[in-house]
């Protein structure tokens, strides 16, 4: 037995706790607790999930989680690798084009000349009338000249409507197990929303069972009368029973009855129902 497993076992037994009670309180699979205490790490999930189990189990038993994780690393002979995190690119800067002074000047002169020619063609401007033009004509001329210039300047300074894509980063958490685990999932194991209890009452007989939790087989053997197991899952629990009438199931504390009516006729049971 490993030193880590011995520490867990001694702390649990000193508090008078059973593995089944610890599994129900911590929401850690009973098989995972047995593997931790026996030091059979190849029966545990990924390294990141295993560290989460150790941290939760240590906090439940009032032990130092950091010390036990370090002991786990020593027993697994794991050393943290240095990760080179790619630098993110700076977002592209929006560019603004300043209006060319000479272009605006020549456009203004051209508009003034065009306005003069137009007014002269209608007989409203004489050779000596420009200096003494009425205020109405002067205002009209100023509006005619200023409006295109203002429109030109406004359209020049208007920012582009194209949206600049934000830089993305594919950086992963540095450390052991971070090679395949994105940042979003490198957290402690969440509490399981599905708690399934499978049992065979005394005097009912026995049945072969295969139980899958979230697609992974967690139990495959013959369950005897009087035995009971608890299984946790995030999304789905699937049970195949060889002798369904003797198998009783409850989900989150609510009894679901037996898995079938015909002895010796295997059935498949899935929760949540499809």
Image: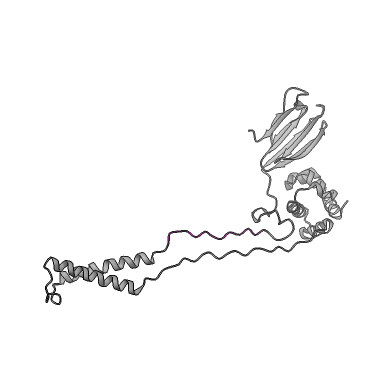
Display coloring: one colour
152 sits left or right of 194 in the view: left
Question: Is 111 covered by the magenta stretch?
Answer: no
Which residue is at a point 82% across and 35% down the rendered structure image?
221
200 or 82: nearer the viewer: 82
115 shown above or below 192: below
Q: Position of residue 142 (x, y in %)?
A: 22, 70
Quarter occupied by residue 77: bottom right
Q: Which residue is situated farthest in the top direction here?
A: 262
27 shown above or below 142: above
Q: How many marks?
A: 0
Quadrant occupied by the C terminus? top right
153 shown above or below 6: below
Which residue is at a point 70% across and 61% down the rendered structure image?
174
255 or 273: nearer the viewer: 273
Q: Position of residue 127 (x, y in %)?
A: 12, 75
221 sits left or right of 82 in the view: right
Extent of the magenta region: 160-171
264 or 37: nearer the viewer: 264
Q: Position of residue 49 (x, y in %)?
A: 73, 51
Predominant secondary structure in magenta? Answer: loop
Q: Which residue is situated farthest in the right direction here?
A: 1
């Amino acid at each position: 037995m490993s030193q880590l497993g011995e520490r867990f076992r001694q702390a649990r037994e000193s508090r008078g706790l059973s593995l089944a009670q610890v599994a129900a309180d911590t929401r850690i699979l009973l098989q995972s607790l047995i593997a931790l205490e026996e030091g059979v790490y190849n029966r545990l999930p990924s390294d990141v999930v295993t560290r989460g189990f150790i941290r939760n189990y240590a906090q439940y038993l009032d032990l130092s989680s950091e010390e036990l994780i370090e002991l786990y690393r020593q027993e697994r002979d794991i050393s943290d690798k240095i990760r080179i995190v790619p630098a993110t690119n700076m977002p592209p800067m929006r560019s603004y084009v300043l209006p060319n002074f000479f272009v605006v000047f020549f456009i203004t002169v051209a508009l003034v000349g065009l306005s003069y020619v137009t007014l002269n063609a209608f007989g409203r401007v004489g050779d000596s009338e420009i200096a003494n033009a009425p205020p109405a004509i002067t205002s009209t001329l100023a509006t005619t000249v200023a409006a295109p210039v203002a429109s030109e300047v406004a359209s020049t300074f208007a920012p582009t409507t194209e949206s600049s894509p934000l830089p993305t980063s594919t950086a992963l958490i540095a450390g052991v197990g971070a090679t395949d685990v994105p940042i979003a999932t490198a957290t402690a194991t969440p509490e399981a929303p599905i708690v399934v209890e499978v049992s065979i009452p005394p005097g009912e007989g026995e049945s072969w069972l295969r139980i899958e939790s979230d697609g992974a087989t967690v139990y495959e053997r013959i369950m005897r009368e009087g035995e009971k197991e608890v299984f946790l899952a995030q999304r789905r629990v699937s049970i195949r029973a060889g002798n369904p009438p003797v198998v009783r199931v409850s989900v989150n504390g609510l009894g679901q009855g037996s898995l079938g009516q015909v002895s010796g006729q295997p059935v498949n049971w899935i929760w949540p129902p499809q």
